[in-house]
Image: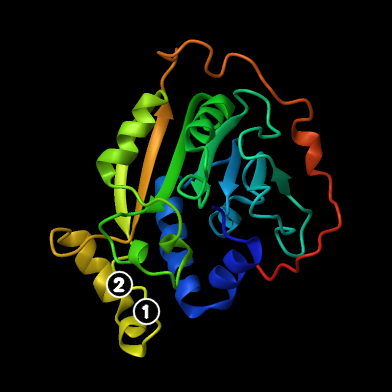
């Protein structure tokens, strides 16, 4: 079950813990994909906190938010690039995406297999997808103080098995968010220490969130996956429209 877009917005943009999580995950995303000039970058779920560095440098940025979650205008002060979409029918033509970020879109979906098929469909040759999900062994999946405490958490093996079944090839696996999901002053002030310790000695504790970069296998082993577009109205749906939710991003 998807969280409401206002809950996600308030966590990532209006809470100290959410802003910390946003910075850690976003910085790691940029480390993975530092250069997107001339590329189309898309996000699904609630990926807006991670897409801002790609605005203005990428050929196109598209922020897709699933219907059960709701949508907000984004980015603030610039032409809108966010769009409300069906979970498994994205308004993008087949093979047009170079980089795809999926955060709060897989573990909260009631049809994760179809979401993975759609992710495969929109990726172009040489494209990569970044899947960000709660770690079943981490503290963040066990706390409802953050969005990572909702939905279906994964182990590394479970996620990579699902990706391979849907013709993705996992390439990079990372863990982040080693500090406890607490707003207590001690944990907030020592957050950077726990992040560095966790990455250098991962056996001590599990990171709260997994990040897996995967490329698409081509041709797919399963017949019919990604062969034809199922979308009637592709990128022109991104024309600015009035929205009801105020964005402070």
Where 120 falls versus 72 (above or below)?
above
Residue lying at 22% horizontally and 64% vertically, measured from the top left: 198
Snapshot quadrant of residue 145? bottom left
Where 134 falls versus 140 (above or below)?
above
| Residue 172, numbered circle | none
Instruction: Look at the numbered discs 1 and 2 and tell me whether their residues touch, using CB distance below 8 Å.
Output: yes
Q: Count residues near mark 1 (Cα–Cα under 10 Å), then give few for <14, some for 14-19, many for 20+.
A: some
Q: Count residues near mark 2 (Cα–Cα under 10 Å), then give few for <14, some for 14-19, many for 20+.
A: many
Q: Circle 2 sits in a helix, a strand or a loop, which is it?
A: loop
Residue lying at 60% horizontally and 72% vertically, measured from the top left: 10
| Residue 179, numbered circle | 2
User: Which residue is farthest bottom?
Assistant: 185
Q: Nearer the viewer, residue 89 or 211?
A: 89
Image coords of residue 149 (percent x, y): 41, 63
| Residue 182, numbered circle | 1
Image coords of residue 120 (percent x, y): 51, 27
- Residue at mark 1 to residue at mark 2: CA–CA distance: 8 Å
Q: Nearer the viewer, residue 80 or 44?
A: 44
Say left or right for 216 vs 91. Answer: left
* Viewer-nearest of discs 1 and 2: 1
Say left or right for 96 vs 147. Answer: right
Where 83 falls versus 17 (above or below)?
above
Image coords of residue 14 (percent x, y): 58, 77
Say left or right for 180 vs 49. Answer: left
User: Which residue is farthest right?
Assistant: 242
Residue lying at 33% horizontally and 48% vertically, measured from the top left: 154
């Amino acid at each position: 079950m998807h969280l409401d877009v206002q809950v996600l917005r308030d966590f990532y943009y209006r809470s100290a813990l959410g802003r910390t999580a946003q910075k850690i995950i976003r910085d790691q995303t940029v480390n993975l994909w530092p250069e997107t000039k001339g590329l189309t970058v898309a996000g699904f779920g609630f990926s807006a906190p991670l897409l801002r560095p790609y605005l203005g440098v990428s050929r196109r940025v598209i922020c897709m938010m699933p219907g059960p979650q709701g949508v907000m205008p984004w980015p603030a002060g610039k032409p809108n690039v966010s769009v409300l979409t069906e979970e498994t029918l994205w308004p993008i033509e087949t093979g047009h995406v170079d980089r795809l970020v999926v955060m709060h879109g897989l573990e909260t979906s009631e049809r994760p297999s179809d979401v993975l098929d759609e992710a495969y469909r929109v990726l172009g040759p040489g494209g990569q997808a970044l899947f960000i999900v709660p770690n079943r062994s981490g503290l963040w999946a066990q706390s409802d103080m953050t969005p990572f405490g909702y939905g279906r958490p994964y182990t590394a093996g479970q996620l990579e098995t699902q990706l391979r079944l849907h013709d993705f090839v996992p390439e990079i696996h990372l863990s982040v968010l080693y500090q406890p999901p607490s707003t207590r002053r001690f944990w907030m002030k020592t957050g950077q220490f726990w992040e560095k310790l966790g990455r250098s000695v991962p056996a001590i504790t599990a990171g709260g969130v997994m990040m897996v970069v995967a490329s698409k296998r081509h041709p797919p082993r399963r017949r019919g996956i990604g062969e034809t577009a199922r979308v009637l109205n592709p990128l022109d749906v991104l024309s600015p429209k009035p929205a009801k939710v105020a964005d402070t991003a």
